[in-house]
Amino acid sequence: MLETTLTQLERLLDDLLQQNSTQQETIARLERELLQLREENDNLQLSNLEQEEQLATTLERLKGMLERSGAGSQSTPA
């Protein structure tokens, strides 16, 4: 009976060690993926900020063109 119990414990211990190893590999993979996703997120946020700046500049240029266009058409006699 004791031998059977020890054998079962050995099998359970081996199973737990294997599960632990598998989980550690999964954790390491997930940490690498998380790092990559964070870097990608940072790059996307930077790109978004750059695009917002470009859009703001374009908007200001268009507003200026509209103001000049409106001022020019108002001063032109009908």
Image: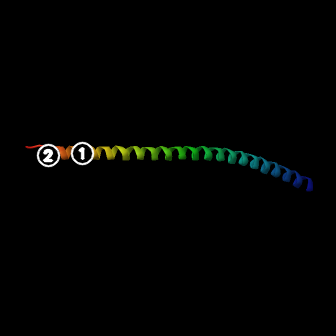
Q: Residue at x 76, y 46 (%)?
A: 21
Task: For marks 1 and 2, give the CA distance.
Answer: 14 Å
Circle 1 residue? 66
Q: How is the image coloured?
A: rainbow
Q: Amino acid at mark 1?
A: Leu
Please identify the quadrant where the N terminus is shown. Answer: bottom right
**Which element type, helix, strand or loop, lies under badge 1?**
helix
Q: Could you say which quadrant of the image residue 25 lies in?
A: top right
Q: What is the x, y in percent for residue 37?
A: 57, 45
Task: Name the residue tied to disc 2.
Answer: 75
Of callouts 1 and 2, which one flags the residue occurring earlier in the amino acid sequence?
Answer: 1
> Residue at horizontal 65%, vertical 46%?
30
How many marks the image carries: the answer is: 2
In what quadrant of the picture does the C terminus appear?
A: top left
- In the image, 5: left or right of 67? right
Q: Are marks 1 and 2 in contact (CB under 8 Å)?
A: no
Amino acid type at circle 2 is: Ser
In the image, residue 45 lies at what x, y percent? 50, 47
Image mark for residue 56 = none
Residue 20, x across and y down, in percent: 75, 50
Depth order, front residue of 51/16 = 51
Provide the secondary structure element on which disc 2 rests: helix
Name which residue lies at 62% across and 46% down: 35
Residue depth check, mark 1 versus mark 2: number of the one nearer the observer: 2
